[in-house]
Structure formats: structure tokens, C-alpha cells
Amino acid sequence: MYQMSREEKEYLAQYSITKYERPSIAADMAVFTIMGNQEKGTVRDKENYRKRPEKRLKILLIKRGSYPYKDQWALPGGFCKKGEEVLEAARRELFEETQVKDAYLKLAGVFGEEGRDPRGWILSHAFLALFGGEKCQLRAGSDAWDARWFEVEFIKERAVEERGEITACKNTTYRLSLTNYDDKEPVFLQTVIREEKSFHQFQVRTKYEIEEEQGFAFDHAKIITHSLLYLRKQAETDGRIVFDLMPEYFTLAELQDAYEIILGKELLTANFRRKMAGYVVESDKMVEGAGHRPAKLYKRNLQSVFVE
């Protein structure tokens, strides 16, 4: 254990932490799930056992019940309590909103741009959270009067690159549309956002600029865009992350559907199943009510989680 010297103790006794301005620390979560349009979880079509239920990638948003941005839609989150680690604050806030304790939760980025919050200097630690929709019980928190799942549509509209000998710049414009159909009148949110990546030798800097926006609180459109791109990259490079969106038992076709939803493209079935072979184990269960050719159900291979 580290032992402080007398000189160090004297220095700390005279040190004032108020010498520098201090930000407030917050945790915000981009909570994603995959579920059907009409229900939480998977409901199989008993009329046509070959037809898989249509699912969508969805994100959880809360409607703010207080200022600032009252009545606007925001990511769930909140401020750290005294003595609380940021990750623990995120877990607490996530449980308060969803009643889920064991979600995948990982820091995706830190947002501290000046003016992002009209209340003052607030650093937001943006977490990516994933779980199957059947686990969730939505409950609006203290600063919200509504909580809903929104369907995600995320489209790359254009990309422009400029290259030099040791520098480069890539600007990619995305259109993010979020829709909720719970009421007779759908709630529709939209933003057009530009990701600017500048490369200098081996260093990369990324920032986001909003070109159009409708209905989002704070800078949460930027956080959602960043989290979606992070999720896609992880699914592309290390596919194990997608399993956190699956139920305990699933068919290989359902697993492929989930990957295609995240990546926004179709995959070759043979190649996909070969890649997934080490990540799944066959169970003794079959799809119930699936006609004369029931599909096998699989589980995640926990041994693949233990290896980095």
C-alpha cells in the first residue's frame, strides 16, 4: 500500500480543490433492444410457422417532465451521487427506468462540449446498454413523465473524403429517424447529423455536427448517433456483442436476423453460421408450435465469453 511522505501530507493539507472549476458528472444511456412492433419479446406466427416475426431495433427514450427541455425526448440517465462511481450511477439509473439489473453496459464516449446543457458545465458519460426486450418493465423516473421504445432507422446519406500525404478528412452524413407507435398519433423524431473524422498521421479525431434536428433534448442526437456507430463497429469486428440482445434460447435464423438489423445489410447464411459456430451451443429444445419441421434452439456458448 502506498505511504504518503510528510512533505506530501503537508502539500495536501494546503491544497484547495476549489482552485479549479469542477463540472457536474452525469451518466446517460443509449439503451437498445430488438423486439416486434406489437409486443415485447418474440411472439411466433402460429398461422405460418415458416414466417419469422418482424422485428426492429429500438431505443429507449424518456419524455422530460421538467426544465430544461420539458416535454422533449431524451436518453435515460442522471447525475452521480456523492461517492458513486459513474458506472454504478449508470446501473442505478438503468434499473430505475427498466428494472433490469444484468444488462450489457459499456462506456461508449464522454461528451462535454460547451453549451451542451443550459444548466452549466456537465460532463456526460455515454453508455451503450443492451438487453432483450422481454426482460424490461418500463417505469418513468423522477425527471420524466413518460418512457417509450422508439423504432430506429439509421441511414448513411453521403460521404466525402479528402486525403493528403499525412492528413485526411472524412465527412459522413447520417439521417436518424425514431418513431413510436404506441398512440393513435405516432411520435416522430429526426435528425441529420454529420460525423467529421480528421486523420493526422496515426491520430484520429471525431466530432459531430447537427445539420437538422426535431424533438431531441440536449445533445442526445449526437450521443445516439455515436452509440449506433459504436454498436455497428463492435458487431462487425467482434460479433459477441449482439448476443446481449437475444433471449436465452434462439434459432440461428433469429440470430442472423439480429445481426442484419444491427448492420443494416443482408448476410450469407452459410458464412454467418460458420462464423457463429464457436459462439453457440445446441440445446435440447425446439421451437414450439412450428409445424412439422420445428427449428432447433440454441444458447450462447459461455466459454466464448471467457476468451478475449
Image (cartoon, grey):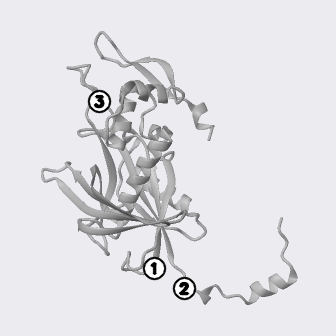
At numbered mark 1, what does the secondary structure look like: helix, strand or loop? loop
Q: What's the residue type where badge 3 is placed?
A: Val
- Residue where numbered disc 2 is placed: 21
The answer to which of marks 3 and 1 sits earlier in the sequence is 3
Query: From the viewer's perspective, is residue 269 above or below residue 20?
Result: above
From the viewer's perspective, is the residue at label 3 or at label 1 nearer?
A: 1
The answer to which of marks 2 and 1 sits earlier in the sequence is 2
- Residue 10 lies, in percent from the top left, at 81, 87
- Residue 95 lies, in percent from the top left, at 46, 52
Q: Residue at x 26, y 20 (%)?
A: 50
Q: Quadrant of residue 267?
A: top left
Q: What's the residue type where badge 1 is placed?
A: Trp
Disc 1 crowd, CA 10 A, few/some/many (<14, 14-19, 20+): some
Q: What's the residue type where badge 2 is placed?
A: Glu
- Residue 34 lies, in percent from the top left, at 34, 41
Taking the image as drawn, is residue 177 in sight? yes
Q: 155 left or right of 271?
A: left
- Residue where numbered disc 3 is placed: 43
Contact between labelled residues 1 and 2, with CB atoms less than 8 Å apart: yes
